[in-house]
Amino acid sequence: MTMPQPTVDYIWKNGKLVKWDDARVHVLTHALHYGSGVFEGIRCYETPAGPAVFRLPEHMQRLKESAKMLYMDFEYSVDELCQIVIDTIKANNITECYIRPLVFRGYGSMGVDPLPAPVEFIVAVWPWGSYLGEDALTKGVEVGISSWRQRSYNASPPAIKACGNYLNSSFARMEANRHGYNEAIILNEVGQIAEGTGENLFIIKNETLMTPCVSDGVLVGITRDSVMDIARDFGYEAIECSLVRSDIYTADEFFMTGTAAELVPVCKCDSIEIGEGVAGPITLKLQKAYFDAVHGKNEAYKHWLTYV
Ligand code: PMP
């Protein structure tokens, strides 16, 4: 299914707001050829006190860390980056949106060494509904274990959000869709569960939440962190541990987290029903609490919001 890209009026590009249609790059842009970029995915939600961005400083900190790994000269402070995001949302007069900052090696010098190419920075925002579909949030999705493996930390580190990393995710996602699944589950080279193509993973067994350790090869998801906090506030144990595919098949509940995907129940993996084969009760309880948090409906999590 192809969806047209929703547009807004302005995109932040290299220090100023430019018209959406004018935010262009040259075909010899380094990142286009060699994947030399890093990015973030953030969401802004409507709240009773106006639009607010969820965990904006944490996303900007991760962006800076990703840029550092690519030896990029990217001297903005977290505060300055947050302000650029807010200015871009305001300029577009939009209340709920997805936010995509991208730092990339631009046009000026070809060849694998990225350092001679200039560093460019854009922030785009646009309205984006549920990543895996509205039904996904209530009914759950079907996933399949991919035949593609996660990149190792000494190949293309999973812990940073680099453009080139998503070639691996794209292989897995295309395969999953070809097999009729909504999303792929990627294992690392030794067969431990890593992550989805754009989501972290959680299983629930005997009321304990378990998610793969960072050292098993995952992006340190900000939704993952938020959901662990929320779960612990409910009194559940939430731990990071190595998991293998049989842990998924025999779990009571299974769900995925990500800024774009939000908190999505998984009802089947490799056509095997997880638990009762429907969105699990603890999953739905955490999902509601997560949506309350992002929509500013729970006082306890208001410190996660940056109001526009
Ligand atoms: N893993 C991958 C590969 C991702 O692309 C994402 C989305 N950024 C996540 C996990 C979830 O991260 P977050 O909750 O910070 O969006």
Image (cartoon, helix red, strand yellow):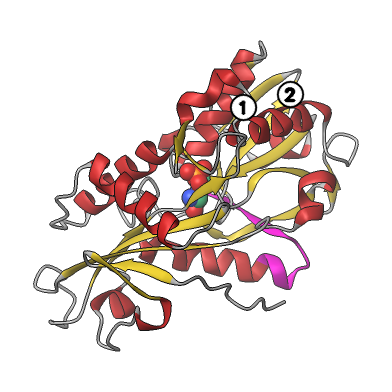
On screen, residue 81 versus residue 73, left or right, reads right
Callout 1 touching callout 2 (CB < 8 Å): yes
Amino acid carrying label 1: it is Met
On screen, residue 14 versus residue 151, left or right, reads left
Q: Which mark is residue 149?
A: none
Q: Residue at x 32, y 70 (%)?
A: 35
Seen in the picture, residue 75 relative to 231 is either above or below; the reply is: below
**Magenta segment includes 137:** no
- Count of marks placed on residues: 2
Q: CA distance from mark 1 to mark 2?
A: 8 Å
Give percent across and percent down for residue 198.
54, 54
Give percent across and percent down for residue 299.
58, 19
Regarding residue 85, the answer to whether it shows in the image is yes
For label 1, the crowd category at 10 Å Cα-Cα, with few meaning under 14, some 14 to 19 and many 20 or more, is: many
Q: Residue at x 66, y 58 (%)?
A: 129
Q: Judging from the image, what secondary structure is the residue with disc 2 in? A: strand
On screen, residue 209 versus residue 288, left or right, reads left
Circle 2 is placed at which residue position?
Answer: 205
Q: Is mark 2 within 8 Å of ligand 1?
A: no
Q: Residue at x 13, y 57 (%)?
A: 73
Residue lying farthest to the top in this orientation:
235
On screen, residue 112 versus residue 240, left or right, reads left
In front here: 30 or 239? 30
Amino acid carrying label 2: it is Lys
Give percent across and percent down for residue 145.
67, 54
Residue lying farthest to the left in this orientation:
116
Tell me which corner region of the image, top left, top right, bottom left or bottom right, holds residue 182.
bottom right
Regarding residue 188, the answer to whether it shows in the image is no
For label 2, the crowd category at 10 Å Cα-Cα, with few meaning under 14, some 14 to 19 and many 20 or more, is: some
Where does the magenta region start and end? 176-189
Circle 1 is placed at which residue position?
Answer: 210
